Amino acid sequence: MLPATVPGWNEATWTHPDALADPGKPDSQAVFVGPFDNLIWHRPRTQRLSGFTHTLEAYKPTHRRINGYYVCPLLAHDQLIARADLARTGRTLTIHHTTTEPHAPPEAPGLFHQACTRMITKTGLNASQGPHNPRAGHC
């Protein structure tokens, strides 16, 4: 491990030497990240690294939820750009609610559609249903 510095951080930080290599071009595939994924499970770190605040609202009463019950962030171009409250209803992907982050790129609706299509294909579902949000996109 090597000592490292991160702008805006005061605490000691370490990195593996391999992490300093050029990461290359980011994956262009947009994908939904589960709320327990390693990328976001440590909420303070996610906030510090990406400015993305994620709260698991499944245990909150319905009237206190802001984004939904089982909210999955949308990862595209190495950024968390949106979120969707997703569920499976029979053989259909149901989208209850979508929100786009303020820094989301103009192509966010297309990336949202790409992630929905990918999820439907990978999970063997038939279709999707849900609200159309012009800023976040739809499936």
Image (spheres, grey):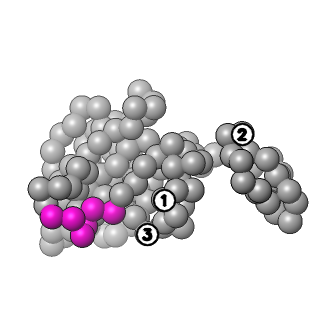
- What span is in magenta? 56-61
**Disc 2 on helix, strand or loop?**
loop
Q: Foreground: 100 or 115?
A: 100
**Front residue of 124 and 13:** 13
The tag earlier along the polypeptide, 3 or 2, is 2
Q: Residue at x 82, y 52 (%)?
A: 4
Return the residue nearer the eye: 74 or 123.
74
- Mark 2 or mark 1: name the one nearer the start of the chain: 2
Counting from the top left corner in percent of width and height, residue 136 is at 30, 38
Task: Pick the quarter of the image with the N terminus.
Answer: bottom right
SS label for mark 1: helix
Q: Which residue is mark 1?
A: 43
Q: Could you classify mark 3 by the number of other residues whose Cα lies within 10 Å: few (under 14), some (14-19), or many (20 or more)? A: few
Across and down, in percent, residue 51 comes to 51, 43
Point out the tag, 3 or 1, that comes first from the N-terminus.
Answer: 3
Q: Which residue is mark 2?
A: 7
**What secondary structure prevails in the magenta region?**
loop
Q: Which residue is rendered at x = 76% and y = 57% of the image?
A: 13
* 96 part of magenta stretch: no
- Mark 2 Cα-neighbour bin, 10 Å: few <14, some 14–19, many ≥20: few
Q: Nearer the viewer, mark 3 or mark 1?
A: 1
Which dot marks residue 16? Answer: none
Q: Quadrant of residue 59?
A: bottom left
Camera-side residue of 100 and 121: 100
Where residue 92 appears, x then y in whole percent?
19, 64
Disc 3 marks which amino acid?
Answer: Phe
Q: Please indicate, yes or no, whether residue 128 appears anywhere in the rendered image.
A: no
Image location (x, y in percent) of residue 101: 39, 37
Residue in the image at 23% along x and 50% along y? 66
Q: Which mark is residue 36?
A: 3
Left or right, 70 with respect to 10, comes to left
Identified by mark 1, the residue type is Arg
